[in-house]
Image: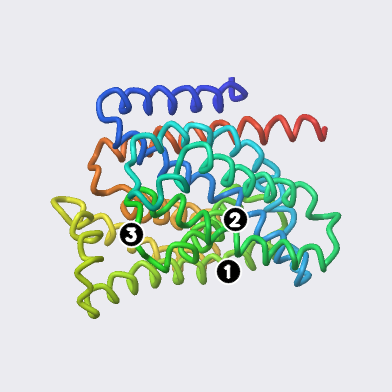
Amino acid sequence: MRRGVPVLVLLAGVALAIAVLLAAPRAAAVGWLAGFVIAGAVPLGATAWLLIARLTGGEWAAPLLPLARVTPWLLVAGLPLAVASLALAPPPHLRVYLSPPLLIARDHAAVALLAWAGRRVERLSVTAAALLLVTYALIVTMLGCDWLLVVEPGHSATVAGMLLAVVQLLGGLGAALLLGTGAHAARADLAKLLVACALALVYMLYVDWLIVWYGNLPEHVGWYVDRLRGGWIVVPFVGASALPATIWAAATDRLRLAGGIALAGMAIGMGWWIGAPDGWPMAVGAVGGAAAATGLMTFGRRREAVRRG
């Protein structure tokens, strides 16, 4: 029975996203994008940490390797982004760059490279790991624009690339702790890194808003005005409340709880940052997108485990 759960989650997520698509196309598109970013942060972040471990000698492979190995399934989960991009309206100077064929081609090429790195990281030399980390920095900067800012093309937020990197690093650590695999000493190290990533995420979201307010930048104000209307003004505070809870859980050696809280806070925060202007239909679409991507990756993880015996 348990073997069929990932498939059921996948089908339920797709059905939910299709239902929202029929009712509110743009909200469904933005929601799927948010769900993909949130779920995809786990394997991509795990891959980045494995490269860091290869470079620094960190003993983190056991908790992170199973997560990194499902990265190729993101290539399938990301295909609907081409359809989703049709519901968005880029300005004239970005119409070619954000056209569905180019968007899917470059983003899938980037994910494919990281998928290759995640599956072969144990055989990489230190030099190769260093070069791939530099490449990751370039890739995540591009993906930050494609995934976080595409909902309002042309909006200039210099934080996007670094924000996506922190989200992915947090996602990989949070999932590794939540699953509870590997030696306790290794997971304790990951918990300390998780706290640092949670602090970085809250700081970056806060300081981006602070710069807009303090600098009185009219061209940027609309981004936050749209995200603070109605009940959505409460959402970032709910997401930020995960920070002290994560610190407490990590400090008291409740490592699985720390991972779960951090992942929940990240999901709430990124769902709000990406798609709050599209309202609650976007949130439903995000749940569908995240469920579909998670089901697909869980299915891939189990297949990998069976293949490896």
Please tell me whether residue 147 is drawn above or below residue 183 in the rendered image. above
Q: Nearer the viewer, mark 2 or mark 1?
A: 2
Residue 192: x and y, percent?
A: 57, 70
* Total marks in image: 3
Q: Nearer the viewer, mark 1 or mark 3?
A: 3
Q: Residue at x 49, y 27 (%)?
A: 9
Report the Cα–Cα distance between label 2 and label 1.
Answer: 12 Å
Q: Quadrant of the N terminus?
A: top right
Element on which disc 2 rests: helix
Q: Which residue is mark 3?
A: 155
Residue 245: x and y, percent?
A: 40, 63
Bin the neighbour count of mark 3 within 10 Å (Cα to Cα): few under 14, some 14-19, many 20 and up: some
Under mark 1, the amino acid is Leu
Element on which disc 3 rests: loop
Q: Residue at x 23, y 73 (%)?
A: 217
Q: Quadrant of residue 59?
A: bottom right
Numbered circle sitting on residue 193: 1
Q: Earlier in the sequence, mark 1 or mark 3?
A: 3
Report the Cα–Cα distance between label 1 and label 3.
Answer: 31 Å
Q: Nearer the viewer, mark 3 or mark 2?
A: 3
Residue 111: x and y, percent?
A: 62, 46
Q: Which residue is mark 2?
A: 45
